[in-house]
Amino acid sequence: MNLILLGPPGVGKGTQAKLLIDRFGIPQISTGDILRAAVKELTPMGAKAKGYMDSGALVPDEVVIGIVEERLAQADCQKGFILDGFPRTVPQADALGQVLSGMGKSIDHVVSLSVDKGELLKRLTGRRACANCGAGYHVDFAPSKVAGVCDACSGQLVQREDDKEETILNRLAVYEAQTAPLIAYYQAAGVLRSVDGLGTVEGVQSDILAAIRA
Ligand code: AP5
């Protein structure tokens, strides 16, 4: 199954992707995670991406298209994949269509998640991740047993650089201007499945499964 999770920052794409990996045995391809790893490892691509990411802007299309094209060619994507955070612009969606068509593949479902802006702000300002193992938490919705400490490895929990309120507002504006048009794009292609992202993580997961089986 070839799946795209589409939706604004903080809607729950990463959280839901991790559950889908276990269920379908296919990999998550998160361009945000790949770019953050490149920034951390100080690679030339990371150096190029950092300024865009810190301000909440999108990294140039040619950079992310190259990342995804390379990743889709890897063996673990043969059975399918979950794209999380890509495509984010119409040129990225066009490029993805061309790459997949060259591989004899296509997108089966685009799950479009939505929640209101107030909820997005709460989810993003309260998000924390372990600096050591990357496990995800939320200060209110999914807290660690000891504040600031990872349950799994006792690493320190940190806030993402771009999860400061001012940057979040910019990311949301960028989403509306550049990514939201993909809803109509995939609706026209007949693969859009709209799912309400409000509710428990398990409840949203079951709505996603129902939408892609319908
Ligand atoms: P990226 O990492 O992709 O960030 P994003 O799309 O802004 O998405 P987030 O990771 O912030 O949110 P999410 O929807 O995954 O929510 P999550 O599950 O974590 O991109 C970062 C940057 O990289 C971009 O700004 C850009 O610069 C660059 N970039 C990446 N891809 C690019 C591309 N294709 N083109 C150009 N640039 C690109 O959930 C959020 C919080 O809510 C968590 O704490 C979670 O625990 C909690 N939560 C989740 N679900 C629920 C629920 N149901 N109830 C309560 N809490 C919940």
Image (cartoon, rainbow, N blue to C red):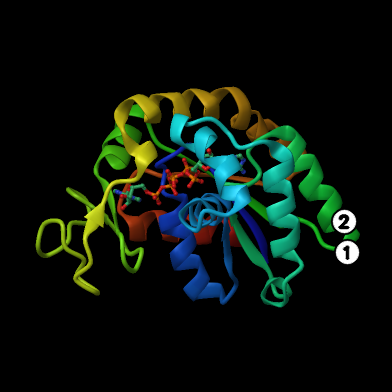
Residue ranking furthest to the left? 146
Count of labels shown? 2
Query: Which quadrant would the C terminus be assigned to in this image?
Result: bottom right
Image quarter of residue 169 = top left
Q: Residue flagged by tag 2: what amino acid is it?
A: Ser
Q: Which element type, helix, strand or loop, lies under badge 1?
A: loop
**Quarter of the image where the N terminus is located:** bottom right
Q: Give the label on residue 144, or none.
A: none
Residue 3 placement, left or right of 139: right
Question: Residue 30 versus residue 131: which sits nearer the camera?
Answer: 131
Q: Are marks 2 and 1 in contact (CB under 8 Å)?
A: yes
Q: Residues within 10 Å of mark 1 (few under 14, many from 20)?
A: few
Residue at (41% x, 49% y) in the render: 12
Q: Is residue 62 above or below residue 177?
A: below
Query: Is 178 situated above or below 87?
Result: above
Give the residue type that dot 1 points to: Gly
* Residue position for label 2: 101
* Foreground of the two, 3 or 170: 170
| Residue 124: % across, % down | 32, 40
Question: Which quadrant of the picture is home to ligand 1?
Answer: top left
Q: Residue at x 36, y 41 (%)?
A: 161
Residue 208 in the image: state x and y as whole percent.
50, 56
* Circle 2 SS class: helix
Q: From the top left corner, tell me how far across and down residue 153 is, in percent.
A: 24, 74
The residue wearing badge 1 is: 104
Residue at coordinates 34% horizontally, 38% vertically from top-left? 163
Q: CA distance from mark 2 to mark 1?
A: 5 Å
Q: Say above or below: 16 vs 196.
A: below
